[in-house]
């Protein structure tokens, strides 16, 4: 019986109507049959045998087929036009391993390829040689794995993808993708790559309501977790359908690999993030490529950024508000905070993403290897040589993530202390880059030499107990160390108890870690302040401050003075550029952690109870509006259904009761709260108005709100 179409429902209709007992088909058709639901819509109880062949059967599909038809015999078939049908038998009903058992048939495996000799082979091709050896053996072109007398098919030799000398069987990656929730079909192919031969590209058909971007990110994350690195697809495309031959076999892109069409309609970032938690968004961002994260950040409006990336935006905004509320209006601070947050997200993983595109991005796409203009390289080399070691002190500012790579490319033997969470990603990217460079033919290419220099960079996790000792040893060997001064991680070594000092910074008393100055004193090497200023997402330039050297001969009693003066100079350097380029300062998010000193007290004259409520009501009834005192460094933050008011002058926070969320929301709007809003509460319930007036009086007394009306503002 031949169906009029290749649709599963048509085949099922015929099976039901004619009580068909044998269904010979392909794994691709079986997968569509199971996904379509047609097997549940028709009576298929007449089936006794289902045979499958012509292409690889994914284990997931076989398992699902066995679960759907537990009483049907499943048989794998094998045959070629040149040899006819070859009888095989499975190790067991649920196994893909088979052995050739047909009379007049012999099989052997040479270099992983199945060879067969058959008494029923064809005479030859009309147009040429038959491809048989003199003694009758035929190369089937099928790659197999041997297990005793059983073989498991891995795929066609013509479909094999070579990635840096390692073999990737498309069916193996397809099987993994099909095992993931939300994937109904999958097809894997190779895409040419001048350095590693091919990279892996996948097409999937979605079987879920999940957004396209979210599905791609989830699959990419799972592939990185479960598959060997060389098998992980570099690109995943969600497509509407795959294409099949008349025999319902997948039409594959050749091993040479053609470019698959990009999706034409990408969802906006706000749509992708709508149903995701902040931790899920962080995981998604972490798995994005350089181009994907660029598109993500450029696709977000400032308002969307504040909402989706509140965990990053809020600390940046609050600290910028504290530092600049006397110099800039609130709208300008919000704009700067949004740009600063974009820079923080971009910089967080920009280095390992950039390393993963090299050297191809330079040789094929003709991108510039040097993202930073760095004229100070020779100066750094000379200082390190003259003083037998050097500490470069930098901050989370501008293109700070790219700075170590740029320094190392110049041939400087660099040791870089980085956050413990950052080191694994950078180290993995460094090793991958090193492996790709080893595949390059020898030559005198300057870019290749620079990359080889960068791969010799040493990374140390800042919080490890032995890091302090390793840094001291490194400096005594005359090498260069790069450290970030504006971090709370890391140990102070044997001077831990004295590893902080008090300074004035941006108008606040702060307590900062002084490990850099202590290390310079102990190793007797100078410190060179350095920043990588951004001139856009892909370029910038390096600037240096004045060299700070410990006294050649100094007494221990002078140590504290040197440490304090050194840290004062370093943070004055940061403050200078922080004032000039606040949008490039993602490290501002940590300033509140450094601040010290007594919290601001309440005003001495405290009016409470009915008198305070009457004063607030009077100010409102005479035409005043209460608004949040943003110009006084007060901010309102929303978390789920709750609001928080934060006074960044005193670092005090206030959590209003849940019933007051509507009032707080109105305080944050341009119009604020007027008497009409309070009067409407009185109409509902007199106690509601009294409670609202009491809350406003408390806000007023703590300096969180102000009256938007000219005139005096009596102390409550």
Image (tube, rainbow, N blue to C red):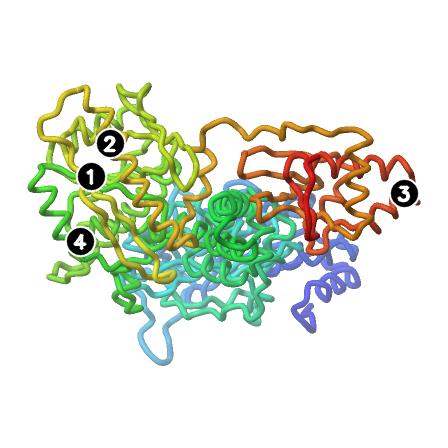
Please tell me whether mark 4 or mark 2 is closer to you in this view. 2
- Between 431 and 466, the residue placed more toward the observer is 466
Q: Residue furthest bottom?
A: 127
What is the number of the mark on residue 376? 4
User: Which image quadrant: the N terminus?
Assistant: bottom right
Q: Percent from the top left, x then y, of residue 301?
A: 56, 61
Q: CA distance from mark 1 to mark 4?
A: 14 Å
| Sequence-first disc among 1 and 2 | 2
Q: Residue furthest left?
A: 386
Q: Is residue 68 visible?
A: no
| Sequence-first disc among 2 and 3 | 2
Residue at 51% from the left image edge and 62% from the top image edge: 237
Label 3: element kind = helix
Q: CA distance from mark 1 to mark 2?
A: 8 Å
Task: From the image, tell me which residue sits under label 2.
Answer: 517
Residues marked 1 and 2 touching at CB (< 8 Å): yes
| Sequence-first disc among 4 and 2 | 4
- Between 127 and 565, the residue placed more toward the observer is 565
Task: From the image, tell me which residue sits under label 1.
Answer: 527
Task: From the image, tell me which residue sits under label 3.
Answer: 682
Q: CA distance from mark 3 to mark 1?
A: 66 Å
Is residue 28 shown above or below 620?
Answer: below
Q: Is residue 456 visible?
A: yes
Residue at 48% from the left image edge and 48% from the top image edge: 324
- Between 365 and 340, the residue placed more toward the observer is 340
Q: Quadrant of residue 484?
A: top left
């Amino acid at each position: 019986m031949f169906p009029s179409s290749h649709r599963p429902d048509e085949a099922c209709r015929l099976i039901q109507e004619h009580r068909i007992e044998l269904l010979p088909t392909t794994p691709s058709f079986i997968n569509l049959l199971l996904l379509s639901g047609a097997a549940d819509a028709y009576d298929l109880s007449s089936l006794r045998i289902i045979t499958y062949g012509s292409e690889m059967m994914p284990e997931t599909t076989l398992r699902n087929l066995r679960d759907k038809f537990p009483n049907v015999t499943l048989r794998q078939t094998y045959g070629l036009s040149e040899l006819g049908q070859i009888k095989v038998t499975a190790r067991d009903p649920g196994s893909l391993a088979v052995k050739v058992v047909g009379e007049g048939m012999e099989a052997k495996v040479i270099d992983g390829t199945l060879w067969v000799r058959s008494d029923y082979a064809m005479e030859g091709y009309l147009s040429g040689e038959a491809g048989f050896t003199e003694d009758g053996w035929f190369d089937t072109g099928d790659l197999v794995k041997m297990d005793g007398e059983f073989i498991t098919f891995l795929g066609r030799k013509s479909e094999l993808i070579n990635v840096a000398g390692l073999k990737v069987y498309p069916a193996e990656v397809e099987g993994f993708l099909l095992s993931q929730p939300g994937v109904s079909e999958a097809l894997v192919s190779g895409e040419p790559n001048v350095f590693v031969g091919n990279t892996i590209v996948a097409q999937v058909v979605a079987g879920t309501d999940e957004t396209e971007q979210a599905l791609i990110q989830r699959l990419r994350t799972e592939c990185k977790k479960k598959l060997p690195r060389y098998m992980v697809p570099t690109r995943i495309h969600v497509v509407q359908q795959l294409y099949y031959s008349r025999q319902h076999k997948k039409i594959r892109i050749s091993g040479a690999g053609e470019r698959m069409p990009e999706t034409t309609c990408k969802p906006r970032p706000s749509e992708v993030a709508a149903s995701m938690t902040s931790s899920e968004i962080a995981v998604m961002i972490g798995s994005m490529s350089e181009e994907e994260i660029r598109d993500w950040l450029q696709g977000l409006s400032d308002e969307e950024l504040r909402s989706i990336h509140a965990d990053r935006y809020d600390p940046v905004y609050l600290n910028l508000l504290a530092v600049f509320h006397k110099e800039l209006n609130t709208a300008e601070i919000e704009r700067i905070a949004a740009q600063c947050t974009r820079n923080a997200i971009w910089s967080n993983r920009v280095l390992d993403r950039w390393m993963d595109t090299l050297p191809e991005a330079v040789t094929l796409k003709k991108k510039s290897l040097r993202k930073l203009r760095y004229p100070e390289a020779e100066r750094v080399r000379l200082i390190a040589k003259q003083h037998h070691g050097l500490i470069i002190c930098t901050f989370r500012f501008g293109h700070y993530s790219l700075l170590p790579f740029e320094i190392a490319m110049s041939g400087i033997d660099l040791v870089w202390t980085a956050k413990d969470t950052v080191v694994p990603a950078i180290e993995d990217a460094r090793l991958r880059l090193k492996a790709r460079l080893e595949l390059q033919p020898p030559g005198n290419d300057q870019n290749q030499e620079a990359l080889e220099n960068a791969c010799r960079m040493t990374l140390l996790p800042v919080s490890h107990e032995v890091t302090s000792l390793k840094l001291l040893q490194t400096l005594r060997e005359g090498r260069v160390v790069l450290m970030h001064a504006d971090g709370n991680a890391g140990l102070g070594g044997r001077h831990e108890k004295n590893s902080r000092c008090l300074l004035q910074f941006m108008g606040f008393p702060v307590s900062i870690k002084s490990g850099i100055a202590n290390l310079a004193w102990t190793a007797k090497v100078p410190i060179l302040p350095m920043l990588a200023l951004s001139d856009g997402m892909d370029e910038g330039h390096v600037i240096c401050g004045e060299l700070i050297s410990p006294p050649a001969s100094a007494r221990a009693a002078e140590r504290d003075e040197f440490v304090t003066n050194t840290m004062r100079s370093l943070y004055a350097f940061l403050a200078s550029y922080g004032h000039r380029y606040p949008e490039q300062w993602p490290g501002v998010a940590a300033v509140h952690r450094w601040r010290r000193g007594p919290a601001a007290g309440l005003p001495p004259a405290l009016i409470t109870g009915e008198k305070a409520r009457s004063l607030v009501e009077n100010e409102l009834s005479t035409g005043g509006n209460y608004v949040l005192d943003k110009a006084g460094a007060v901010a309102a933050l929303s978390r789920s259904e709750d609001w928080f008011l934060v006074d960044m002058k005193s670092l005090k926070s206030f959590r209003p009761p849940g019933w007051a969320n509507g009032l707080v929301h109105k305080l944050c709007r341009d119009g604020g709260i007027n008497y009409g809003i309070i009067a409407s509460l009185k109409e509902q319930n007199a106690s509601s108005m009294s409670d609202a007036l009491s809350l406003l009086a408390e806000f007023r007394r703590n300096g969180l709100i102000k009256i938007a009306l000219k005139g005096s503002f009596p102390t409550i």
